[in-house]
Image: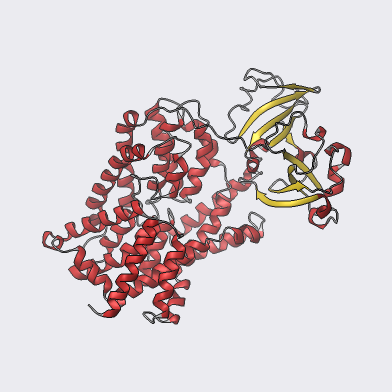
Amino acid sequence: MSLQQALVLAGLAWLVFELIRGRHAPATVFGSIALVFVVVDFISVKDSLAQFTNEGLVTVVVLLLLSVVLDKSRLLERAAEALLRGGYRWALAKLYAATALYSAFLNNTAVVASLLGPLKQSRLHPPSRLLLPMCYAASLGGILTLVGTSTNLLMNSLMVGRGLPPLHIFDLFPVGILIVVGCAATMLLTYPRILKAMPPADEAPTGYFLEATVTPGSPLVGRTVEAGGLRRLSHLFLTEIVRDGRVIAPVEPDEALQAGDLLVFTGDITRLDLLTQIDGLKTHGQHYQLPLDNLVEVVVAANSTLARRTIKEVDFRSQFDAAVVAVRRGSERLAGPIANVPLEVGDTLVLVVGKDFDKRNNLSRNFVIVSRHEVQKFIDPRKGQIAMAGFVAVIALSAFGVVGFLKGLMVLLALFLLFGFARVADLRRNMPYGLIVIIASALIISEVMIRTGVAGILAGALMAGASDHGPYAALAVILVVTWILTELMSNNAAAALAFPVAMGVAEHLSLSPAPFVMAVLYGASCSFVTPYGYQTNLMVMSPGRYTLGDFARAGLPVSLVFIAIALAAIPVFFPFA
C-alpha cells in the first residue's frame, strides 16, 4: 500500500468516525475531506470544480427549489380524513398507498410534514398507530422514481460522474414497486399487533391568538362547531368565541355559530391558510384586502406610540399599511377581540402587510422587526392545483422523451417565478447549500478513491471470501453494508461512501456495475430500525410518543423484507452481465 493510499484511507476513516459521532454537520465533514484532497493534489482544482456542474447535481438543486412551490399544495392534507375512514387495516392500507405515491414525486420530508398535523389530530385512530407507518411509507415511496429522494439523485450524479448511463425517471420502479408492496404486506400483517395505542403527545401552545369572523350569510351560521369542521383543524385550535361582547370559553362541540361571531384560535400562525379555506370566515387581512401569503413578526418598541392603546384606537391599517392577525404577550392568556386589547411594550404581533409597509417612516419608532414568516400553503387552492399539474406534465413529457427532464424542470421553475408562484427571495432562502456541498464533495472523494486505487482495496477487503460464493453474495454484502451505514449516519452520506466501493466490487468481479450501484441506492433508503438514520423518523418520534424499542420492533421486519426483495429483484432488472 502506497503512502497516498494510506492517507486517503485515513481521511475516509476520519470521515466515517465524524459522521457516526454526529458532532458536525455532514456538509462540513464532507467538505473538509474534499478540500484536503484538493490541497494535497490528490485531485486537481479544475477537476474538483467540474463536479459542481454535474448534471445530476444541477437536477437536485432545481428539483428542490421546485419543491418550495409544490409543497404549498394542500392536496394530500385534504385527503387525510378520507384516508383514515374504516377499520385500522383498511385505513393503514389507504394511508400507506397515498403517502408512497405522493413521495414518489415530491420531497418525502414535505410529505411527512403535511400529514403530521392531520394524523396527530385524528379521532378515528390513535396517532401512535398511524405516524410511524406513514413515515416508513414516505421513505419507501422515494425508491419508486428517480426524483423520489435526494439520495437517488445523488447516486445519479455519481453515476454520471463515472461515465455510466444516467438513470431515467422510472428506471427504479420495477424493483421499487416490489419492495413497496412487500413492505406494505408486512405492515398490514404485523402492525395491528406491534403498534400500541398511545395517548397523543401534549404540545405546548404557541401563545399566539388568531381571529376570524363569521360573515353574514355564511354557511356556518346555525351549524355547530363540530358540524362546521372547526374542531378538526390540524394546526389550529378554537379556544373561544366572542359574541356581542361576551366571551364563550371553553367552546363546546355542539355550540351553534351565529353571524358576527368572532372566533379566536391558537396554534401555528403560518397555517393561516386553513382559516381562509373555510367558506364564511374572514380574517383581519381579508377584511382589509391585504395579501396573506407572507407574515411579519414584530415587537412593540419601548418608545412606541402604540403602548397602552388598542389597535382600533390607533387606526393601525392607515398608519402602517398592515393588519394584526395574531398577538402574544409572554405566557399571559389574552381574552376578547384583538382590536380591543390595549397593547403593551414587548407585545409580539404578527402582521399581514401591504406594499407600502416597508416604506413607512414610523416603523423603527414603533416596532422591532423580529422575523418574516411565509404562510406554509397557498391561500388560493387553485395555485396548488396548477403547480401540481405543471409538475406532472413535465414528468409525463420526460417519460415519453418529448423533453429532457432537467430542461423541463428549469422551464417550470422559470414559469413559477414569472407568474408569482415563487419569489427569488423564497428560492434564495431555500437553496440547499448543505446538500450541494455534500454531493459535490462526495463526487470529489469518490473520484479520489477510484483514481488512487483505494476503492479497489476496500472492495477486495469487503469481498474476502464472499467472491467465492458468486455475485449474489457480493451483492448481499454491498446491500447489507449500505443498510448498516444508513442506520448509523444520513442516507446521503451512506450512499456517497458506499458508491466507490460498489464500483470497486464490480471491477474486482469483472461484472456490470449496475446491480452493485443499485444495491447502494436501495440500501441507502432502508432506514427503519433507528430514528436517527433519516430525518422523517425523528419528525414522528415525539408526536407518536415512540421509543427506540418501537422503532426496532416496527422497523426490523420491514428492513428484512426490504433487503430480501431487493436482493432477489435487483439482478433481474439490472443484470450482472
Query: Relative to residue 574, is residue 371 drawn left or right?
Result: right
Is 560 or 222 nearer to us in this picture? 560
Q: Residue at x 35, y 55 (%)?
A: 172
Image quadrant holding the C terminus, namely: bottom left
Q: Residue at x 24, y 71 (%)?
A: 456
Q: Going by the picture, which residue comes out furthest to the front?
A: 302
Colouring scheme, one of rainbow, by chain, secondary structure, one colour: secondary structure
Q: Residue at x 82, y 49 (%)?
A: 366
The answer to whether residue 406 is seen in the rendering is: yes
Q: Is residue 503 above or below residue 551?
A: below
The answer to whether residue 405 is seen in the rendering is: no
Quadrant hosting residue 245: top right
Q: Is residue 549 above or below residue 521?
A: above
Q: Position of residue 507 (x, y in %)?
A: 22, 70
Quadrant hosting residue 163: bottom left
Quadrant hosting residue 185: top left
Q: Residue at x 45, y 81 (%)?
A: 46
Query: Relative to residue 149, is residue 383 drawn left or right?
Result: right
Is 294 or 343 nearer to us in this picture? 343
Is 303 or 109 nearer to us in this picture? 303
Image quadrant holding the N terminus, namely: bottom left
Number of labelled discs? Answer: 0
Q: Is residue 310 above or below residue 126?
A: below
Query: Relative to residue 560, is residue 44 drawn left or right?
Result: right
Q: Going by the picture, which residue comes out furthest to the left?
A: 468
Q: Position of residue 48 (x, y in %)?
A: 43, 77
Q: Position of residue 56 (x, y in %)?
A: 44, 66
Q: Position of residue 573 (x, y in %)?
A: 26, 56
